[in-house]
Image: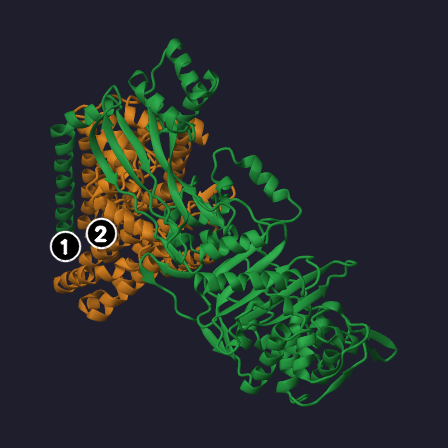
Chain colours: A green, B orange
Amino acid sequence: MRLRFIKNITVFFFIALALLLAYIQCIQSPRYTELSRNNRIRLIPLPAPRGNVYDRNGKVLATSTLAFDCSVIPQEFESDKDKMIKLSSLLGLGRERIEDVIEKGSGAPFMASVLKKDIGKESAIAISEAILDFPGLIISTYPVRYYPYGNTCSHVLGHLGKISGEEIGVLKNYGYKTVDLVGRGGIELYYNNYLRGEDGGRQTEVDARGRQLDVLGIREPERGRDITLTIDIELERYIDSLLEGHRGAVAVMESSSGEMLALVSKPDFDPNIFVAADGTGAIRSLMRRRDYPLVNRAISGAYPPGSVFKIVTATAALEMEKINKKERLDCAGFYMLGNRRFNCWKKSGHGTQEITDGIKNSCNVFFYQIGRRAGVDGISQYALTYGFGAATGMDLPYEAAGIVPDKAWKRRRKKESWYEGDTVNYAIGQGYLLVTPAQLLRMANAVGTEGELFVPSLVKKISDVDIFAPEKKHTGISEDTFKIIKEGMRKAVEERGGTASGARVDGMDIAGKTGTAETGIERKTHAWFAGFSPVEKPKISLVIFLEYGGKGGAHPCSMASDIFKKLRGIGYL
Amino acid sequence: MYKIRYRKNFDPLLIILPLAICVIGLFFLYSASRGMQELKGMDFMSRQAAWILVGLLLLVLTINVDFRRILDWSYLYYFVIVLVLAALLAFGGSKMGARRWLNLGWIVFQPSEFSKLALILALAFYLGNNRFSARGLKTYIGAFLITGILFMLIVGEPDLGSAIALLPVLFAILLAAEAPFKFIFGSILLGAAASPMFWNFLKDYQKRRLLVFLNPDMDPLGAGYTIIQSKIAIGSGGLFGRGWMSGTQNQLNFLPERHTDFIFSVVGEEWGFMGSILVIGLFCLLIARILAVGERTNDFYGRLVVAGVAGLISFQAIVNIAMTAGFMPVVGLPLPFISYGGSSLITTWLCIALVINIDMRRTIF
């Protein structure tokens, strides 16, 4: 009958179970008894090294070095008073502290509890020599993140930090443990899952002295994947030294691919302090500083661009056919809107100019006029086309989108309607407009390549796999417009009187635009320069931003000139 | 109230055996929880004892009701459980990364346990109604569907163990319903062939558990740790064990979860092979007595319920013990009557109650 069948199956399995239990409880018993009786089982985690980060030429930007911990296995630890004194002096720790750690660790008596982290090689050697006197004491090695270039490239690389409570709740099933370090900011964060290896572990049987007898189980740690950046560290270091003492950002891009050759933000920080054993004080003061050194100004800072934005205004006016190559407009040093007076930066005015001269001289009055012709919505449309108002998509976290205002925006945010005066300000890159240096770089590059809007990229390879594929979008703006704007930008640098003539380099062919943005603080303006070289088929585009740096034509241009020379020197131009 | 006639048909072993197992369980819970007192602050033994009393109370209450009347509402219980499981998936908070528990203030309630009982009733009712077409493929597939819905809801929690426990219930009841053997073998073969596909649906840590079973040395600090420690505990018990409350592996906190899924390692360590045989023997006897009820009764539905209960209890017991001894991968299945857990205890007692109910109402003719 069917039920008998069920009974037979069930009884069969029970008997099989009983036999198997007989095997381990009767026949194998002595072995297991031995294991448990002496309680000599050790659990040693084998941490996995994190992947390295290299620059485009293979130089090491982030790697791991070995550090030593001194730990104790509470189950095995035996000591008397004299030994404790000796141990205390070897470690440089008070006796109560040692006893405290041992007591707290008794909850998991086979796991090593850390007595002192990062004890240094000499200490490690000294303790190892005495280790037979201290059963249960072990020196374990573990990898510590090391950034050989210190402050340089710190914003791109990011740093590490301990995993937080909420993160562990989510990530526990994926193997993250409460003591894990995860990337915070920069490439360390963005590519954390690739850089992170997989920890291993070992369960061993040891004798009374702590010497290993038998490995009960082992899992090898798996190294994280290495990442190769597009950054050239020599260029990065050079720019770093140029920016010394300033606040701001510089970004350099390879025009035909969107690869970032350098990305510098000042002030910066030394990521090594985040993994130093005693770094807490330094970290805290870093976070309290009012100049916010942990913010990557190149992508997370949104600022008024000032005159650099005139490129967008010009694009709008040309595309919308509100102005052409030949038309000349007059600048007398000021512009009247109703009974409100808007000044040009040159009090005596520029006289009549056509558009390329308007760009060369960065004439405000010229742009007030064509900006009004294009209208706020016209300018905004082209601003969006150039990629403003949205993150560039670079592979770094915390990118800001900036603000591209229009009539609807103002009504929503400021509960007011848009005034003509706002358009006038907007046309010269002031007002509600906010952009990041990365967005401006992209815009300059788009002009240089006559229409290609790239996603800037920082990573060339993961392990040995080339992952870089240029991602670009065509702006749909006409070739003629670009030719006109380029001519204006070329004149600005190459011709005498151009606002960007400070960027000129003998024997090179450079186009650029300066910007001096009012910030609302008296006499403190942001200084900008964006440009590319060579003018016809550019190889390099760059942007320079100096927070409260004065006039665009001053420092940014001289820095640009130096950077272009350096680029020539190392072979990019 | 029930007639005196019914009382005579009662097999006392059906209460004595589970109770004996429960009491043994209490002894080991006490021993296991001693080391844990400081950590958890809960008195496992008293709570478990309280749940046992609740179970007995429910048993006394339900045997007053004819089981056929209980069966009539099977689809309702099934529906309610499906709703609760669905709600759990949608809204349940997460404890240890799994949505298995519903926290109702002072008690924590595990719906997947009750779903096992609901399945027994639903399948018995369904296959009992379609008795003569039980040989038909359509009915067969219907049974799979009923099980499948619950299976998917539970696996989504994720609770692989409870979901898997539904399968022996399904097959036991199908067998008892005289489904053709060829269907049964056919579906087992199909399942075996399709199982590589299911691999992809497992979460990483569940995959790891299966791999670790095949090679516990592979993950000695994680999932493999528990298995290795449990094996050591059981193995070191020897023939007679190390004595109650003297198991060093468990007293010294080497075994996490020793009050729930791994409780058998405490049995093995402290009472040795004798203890293991005792527990296995008691279960074996219990299953035999349960199945004997099925042979005695002439109610078809009753026979199906009996088969389901026998399948459930024996599967859980066998798998749990095999798991703690390292013969099977770690899945979350409790040892009936012994593992700490109110929901499991109540469910199993209710199963016993049903079996007694069926036995009491059998007709001699």
Helix, strand or loop at label 2? It is: helix
User: B181 or A88, which lies in front?
Assistant: A88
Which residue is found at the position 55% from the left and 58% from the top? Answer: A398
User: A417 or A455, which lies in front?
Assistant: A455
Up-down relation of residue B331 to residue B20 (above or below) = below
Q: Are marks 2 and 1 in contact (CB under 8 Å)?
A: yes
Instruction: Estimate the x, y position of residue A108 in percent, counting from the top left.
Output: 37, 29
Which residue type carries mark 2? Ala
Which residue is found at the position 69% from the left and 85% from the top? Answer: A354
Which residue type carries mark 1? Arg
Instruction: Estimate the x, y position of residue A532 in percent, counting from the top left.
Output: 54, 71
In the rendering, which numbered label is found on residue B249? Answer: none
For disc 1, the marked residue is A2
Instruction: Estimate the x, y position of residue A90 in percent, counting from the top left.
Output: 40, 19
Up-down relation of residue B303 to residue A358 (above or below) = above
Position of residue B328 in the picture relative to residue A319 (left or right): left
Which residue is found at the position 34% from the left and 27% from the top? Answer: A139
Instruction: Estimate the x, y position of residue A231 in percent, counting from the top left.
Output: 45, 58
